[in-house]
Amino acid sequence: MIRIAVLGCGRIGVMHAANIAAHPRATLAGVYDIHAPAAAAVAKKTGAEVFSSVEAVLASDSVDAVLIATATDTHADLLEMAVAAGKPVLCEKPIDLSLDRVNRCAATIAGSALPIQLGFVRRFDPGHAAVRRAIVQGDIGELHQVVITSRDPGLAPKAYLRVSGGILRDMTIHDLDMARFILGEEVTQVFATGSRLVDPDLMEKLGDHDTLTVVLTTASGKQAIITNSRRATYGYDQRVEALGTKGMAISENRRPHEMTLHTAVFTDRAEPLLNFFIERYREAFDAEISEFVDAVESGRAPSVGFEDGRLALVLAEAALKSIAEARVVAVKEIA
Amino acid sequence: MIRIAVLGCGRIGVMHAANIAAHPRATLAGVYDIHAPAAAAVAKKTGAEVFSSVEAVLASDSVDAVLIATATDTHADLLEMAVAAGKPVLCEKPIDLSLDRVNRCAATIAGSALPIQLGFVRRFDPGHAAVRRAIVQGDIGELHQVVITSRDPGLAPKAYLRVSGGILRDMTIHDLDMARFILGEEVTQVFATGSRLVDPDLMEKLGDHDTLTVVLTTASGKQAIITNSRRATYGYDQRVEALGTKGMAISENRRPHEMTLHTAVFTDRAEPLLNFFIERYREAFDAEISEFVDAVESGRAPSVGFEDGRLALVLAEAALKSIAEARVVAVKEIA
Amino acid sequence: MIRIAVLGCGRIGVMHAANIAAHPRATLAGVYDIHAPAAAAVAKKTGAEVFSSVEAVLASDSVDAVLIATATDTHADLLEMAVAAGKPVLCEKPIDLSLDRVNRCAATIAGSALPIQLGFVRRFDPGHAAVRRAIVQGDIGELHQVVITSRDPGLAPKAYLRVSGGILRDMTIHDLDMARFILGEEVTQVFATGSRLVDPDLMEKLGDHDTLTVVLTTASGKQAIITNSRRATYGYDQRVEALGTKGMAISENRRPHEMTLHTAVFTDRAEPLLNFFIERYREAFDAEISEFVDAVESGRAPSVGFEDGRLALVLAEAALKSIAEARVVAVKEIA
Amino acid sequence: MIRIAVLGCGRIGVMHAANIAAHPRATLAGVYDIHAPAAAAVAKKTGAEVFSSVEAVLASDSVDAVLIATATDTHADLLEMAVAAGKPVLCEKPIDLSLDRVNRCAATIAGSALPIQLGFVRRFDPGHAAVRRAIVQGDIGELHQVVITSRDPGLAPKAYLRVSGGILRDMTIHDLDMARFILGEEVTQVFATGSRLVDPDLMEKLGDHDTLTVVLTTASGKQAIITNSRRATYGYDQRVEALGTKGMAISENRRPHEMTLHTAVFTDRAEPLLNFFIERYREAFDAEISEFVDAVESGRAPSVGFEDGRLALVLAEAALKSIAEARVVAVKEIA
């Protein structure tokens, strides 16, 4: 049993805590939150210990590893502290909104052989992972084109959007990682274009965009296209398509159930998609914990690590530059 | 080029005439209808000859074969006349509403080696035919269960229903033939139950049913289930499913196009099904003509012949007896 | 928090125990199994108390309600004991293989107002429940026909089949309950036909069938058709279809994920269905516990109770008689 | 009856001739081909007159309108001749590979009020047209993003590729028109990137690309993304997706039939897509003729005209420039 403590008991921390508690090879060793009642509430249901400080968690002998689910601007600090304390880490994305800070963090932890996993949970989605597996198995031959559709059900609250770092660092970053995961080779050139269509006034004020297209290319000419929107009324739209010399693999959306209605004016009418990332990626969050438990048990590096977090941020920076200058940006201009 | 004359220029005769005219290996040699202007209208568009009598058609040297699309109560007579005249026949179903008349017709034409094809058009539907092909190829192993869903978009006009011979002889007869086609072996026992739900008063008056379930079994225990309704508001519902030891094949419904709509209250909303048998079975009607042309060209028996028409009627009679007596009826009680 | 003890720590008891432990409004108060290590294993992961006897569970003040997941032949006894002890019960189906025993059990508990829920879990499946909801909401108008497809991925072990009570009492019983649930009115007539196609020798020996069709009708003429097979190689096939005057609702199968493959020889190729009832009905098992928690909290009767368990068994008996006598059996001949 | 003559009896001319002959409001008045036997073969089946020259067609009183289906480099000349002769024209795309020539043609025919229709057949596809209709009806609210997937089953013959004008003028031009059709407003900026993945050597030699992504934006910020490939082994991949404030409309691919196979290793396996544009767009080619007949009958402008042909070519030129210069190109740089 791997004993994992969860730092941060907000929405996503609470979910991780429950998943760890229910996991067959893990136990929830403890919880911490800067707001003590949040941690206490999790402890009450799970029986886990409440820690009074991050330091106490990291010093505890009953904690094998930590999961960082605190506010984004604390990720890099906590990650460095955990590595210093010799605790393997599963850190929610992004590492930081600043590429500089991420680069410094990379330098700080450079020597460590500890398992460090980044929370790019979508890599563990059964459907998306099956697309990658189809490629690796040769089912679609040589990969040519990847199309990633990623649309939120609606705009996040303004308060969140202000600190999110913008659509590219907050939302697209998942898709940039997914593109790297599916492509299986590094992106060398980035083109992006952003529009303000969902809430033009707010986006103008924030200097942000709500509708985005990103085109990534690799040295060998593979193309990955990402289409983003902050507003898909029909639900959380998450699709991945890969075209190769021998065929195509598509990971389609999931619905809450498979009931369809057929009447005189329509057929095949189904429910809206799952709206909420915690429901949509339920199996993926479970599998993410399993990957972390495997890594801690074996001491090997997780399949998605710190450098993946850093490179996704590099691509986000390149995309921002591309929008600003209306041209293709070479990744090496950034990294 | 096979020169085919069409007898009967009602809705289905007009369609056949157009298909023959457009067929790469056939020409429309002529048309006849008891109501001369109906034939003239077809001739005007296609340039085909208008014949003034069935006898003239059958005597003509420029007619290689005939398609019988007249009223049901003339089918058996015309079929016998055509065979006597040495013309291959494609006859619309049913041969007759009376099994006695069909048996007498069978006796009359018994010696003939002419190609005689019955208009069980659904055997030529690309989807339904692919189910049969999957079975023949061994894709689903030994066949165990067949489920045929067959529902009309709405009640036919009363005038038609009065002369239709009842749901079993008019509508289910197609499904009984489909069951035989898919099963690939003869049905030995029949169970049926009928309800009056779509228009109870009318059905009571006609002594007919509008909602039907038929269960057929073969000597080896294979089962075929037919569900019929006279009212499927969502369109003409035509599905065939076959379960075997190795898998399942399903022929699903077709839509007029593949546009789907996704909003805050639904996803995947498609158009109603094709409503009309001529549109739904467009490819099948084409393929039916090709089969007839092949048979006439080669002199071999068509894949669906007179005896298939007779046996479907035998099963309909067995089903009627089953409803009346609330028990399983052995086919040999009828045949 | 409702404190629930689980009796029986076999496959299904272990699953229920985990679901109760993770439920937001329930706690796992204790576990019992005739084989003590089975209970101990569950207790180790969840921290629940291990009880040494059923009597101890029923006498405990820290147990609000019990879930019976023991061997079928103990269900009726334990149910009676729990009711006598004043504990609400969630009992796995079937109550007993003998209708006599079930009727006696009904008499014994007749006066009790305790919540007693039967484990017809499929009623809680989001898709199947949505079909029923569509009917109740009037989305498909007056109901005419119900088609239930229910096929196991493969034959259960012989040892199990010998004590299962036969396909009708073991497997079809779920579908008979589903038919009652969807129909929303009582079945008055039953027709069934059984074949031996999956394993003819074994079925002959057991006097059982592996391929089944059941046709149920209500007094108003509504029809429900059940097709069963012990062998669907493509996975656990669980579909419910309802046709009404205004339209149709279908609850389709679910797949482990939505990845499809498209190549030169096929398109839309998806994974086999979920094979295992615990995975297929995961959400339903969760919702079943929620329904029980609601009932215990409120003291009201659960939506699916003892009489539903009894009536499903009555229909199974009628179907067995129908197979034996090759005729329609009136339900009142049995009940 | 509108009497239409077909100029050019290659593959597509033969198809148009047959469609015109079968059309209820049109007749095939005549055919012409530079290679006389090609015209004779069409005439034999349809009974149409064979003309010995374009001049003879245009001078004939029995010809109301002409369809130009000759080699691309003759389109502009024949179009000018037909207009001069006062015959309405349906001209296959593209008007010419040279934008200069197209502009000169535009100037030549500028004064004419004759119906001139461009052969952008995909606008008439029932599914794609339903996407546009959904937008016009307000079903998806304000349009934000359009995604067009357009992939050929395989590389055309080298001989064709050499004279095709390149992927943008030959293949993407359909998608550029589709983007304009769906967007409903003019494109102002174009980005494109091309790769050589299907046949790198040949593409290098031709200075062409086989894998393409084009991103179009309008003045209001609407985005249209086109993904092209010369090789989709699973068939002719033709999809259109539109996202708006209220929802999404998708026109999905069509299959030859709806039979799916389900076994122990897969489910839902369908046939490859229709491979050939004439089959895939069969209904669209019919509807295109109907639109032309309507226009000729009424004298009004067809819904897709000369200027649409010209503007698609302008976008193709902009995309070529974008690829060459790795930057966004403003449409006004070209037009």
Image (cartoon, coloured by chain):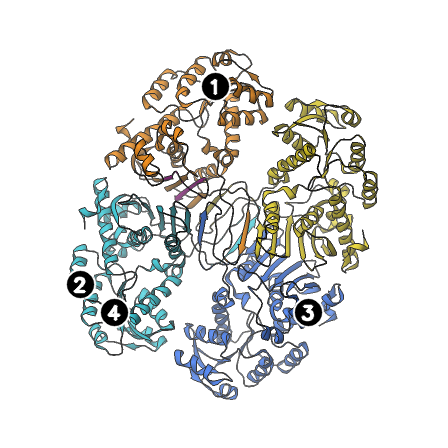
Chain colours: A cyan, B yellow, C blue, D orange
Binning the other alpha carbons within 10 Å of mark 1 as few (below 14), some (14 to 19) or many (20 upward) gives: many
- For the point 70% across and 47% down, which residue is it? B177
Q: Is residue D276 left or right of residue A60?
A: right
Residue C144 visible within the image: no
Viewer-nearest of discs 1 and 4: 4
Side of D37 where A42 appears, left or right: left
Residue type at tag 4: Pro
Disc 1 to disc 4: CB gap under 8 Å:
no
Q: Mark 4 or 2 closer to N-term?
A: 4
The residue beneath circle 3 is: C204
Span colored in magenta: D227-244
Residue A88: which disc? 4
Local crowd size for mark 3, using a 10 Å CA cut-off: few (<14), some (14–19), many (≥20): few
In the depicted view, which residue is nearer to us: C22 or B226?
Answer: B226
Mark 2 — on which chain does it sit? A
| Residue B307 vertical placement versus D314 (above, below) | below
Judge by depth and name the residue closer to the eye, D258 or C312: D258
* Disc assigned to residue D88: 1
